[in-house]
Amino acid sequence: MLLQFMTTIQPTELQSVLQSDHTAQLLDVRTPSEHAQIHVPGVHLVPLQRLDGSELAASTGFLKAKPVYILCQSGGRAKQAAAKLEQSGFEKCCVVEGGTSAWAAAGLPVNRGSSQVISLERQVRIAAGLLVFSGVVLSQFVNPAFIWLSGFVGAGLIFAGATDWCGMGMLIARMPWNQGSSRGSK
């Protein structure tokens, strides 16, 4: 559930804010491996599954009364992070529309790394496709009841699309290959 105070901002608008306010609070809630591939300069990394508003204020010095600009890959996880932060007392959470993808597409400055990990969104598509395919093959050659595996994954994808919450994505984000760099890095 999104709270009433969450707002959004376009990447170009945020760039203007950053040029005038060098103390703006930027938060990246993607996985460490996604962050290592590409990120906005000066952003603090705290993956969504580890995000705790009270701990964020203590560890980064983020002020609860000052806007926090939140980025993820495309916007979904940033909305979840905004809800978490607002429940922890942050007064103004601003989701960057389109996330890091839109920031880079707008030609704004980014830091690029050499990480070769596939994006979380692609990992979810690969896993879902593999499970659906496996369910169909197993239902043909092992036991017809395996077709329910495909149905379960399909229902999960519908739920993820409708609610913008993906359990499979949250699980895959915790995998060791997605934990490349340390928490809270800039």
Image (cartoon, helix red, strand yellow):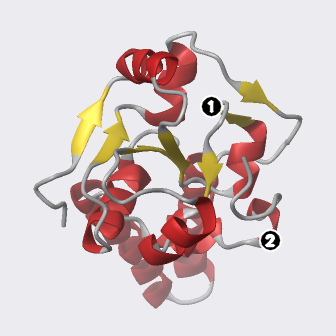
Residue under the image location 28 percent in, 61 percent down: 158
The front one of 113 and 82 is 82
Q: Amino acid at mark 2?
A: Pro
What percent of the width, then of the height, locates residue 117? 79, 48
What percent of the width, then of the height, locates residue 140? 55, 76
Q: Quadrant of residue 98?
A: top left
Does residue 132 show up? no
Say above or below: 146 vs 166.
below
Q: Neighbour class for label 2 at 10 Å: few (<14), some, many (≥20)? A: few
Residue under the image location 54 percent in, 28 percent down: 22
The front one of 186 and 73 is 186
What percent of the width, then of the height, locates residue 100? 54, 33
Say above or below: 86 vs 18.
below
Please tell me which of labels 2 and 1 falls first in the chain. Answer: 1
Q: Nearer the viewer, mark 2 or mark 1?
A: 1
- Element class at badge 2: helix
Q: Neighbour class for label 1 at 10 Å: few (<14), some, many (≥20)? A: many
Looking at the image, do the residues carrying marks 2 and 1 touch, with CB atoms under 8 Å apart?
no
Q: Quadrant of residue 39?
A: top right
Residue that lies at the very extreme toward the top in this rendered image: 107
Q: Which residue is mark 2?
A: 176
- Element class at badge 1: loop
Residue under the image location 45 percent in, 76 percent down: 54
Tell me the quadrant of the picture where the N terminus can be found: bottom left
Q: Which residue is mark 1?
A: 40
What percent of the width, then of the height, locates residue 105? 53, 16
Residue that lies at the very extreme toward the left in this rendered image: 4
Q: Amino acid at mark 1?
A: Val
Measure the C-alpha gap from mark 2 to mark 1.
23 Å
Does residue 156 show up? yes
Residue under the image location 85 percent in, 42 percent down: 115
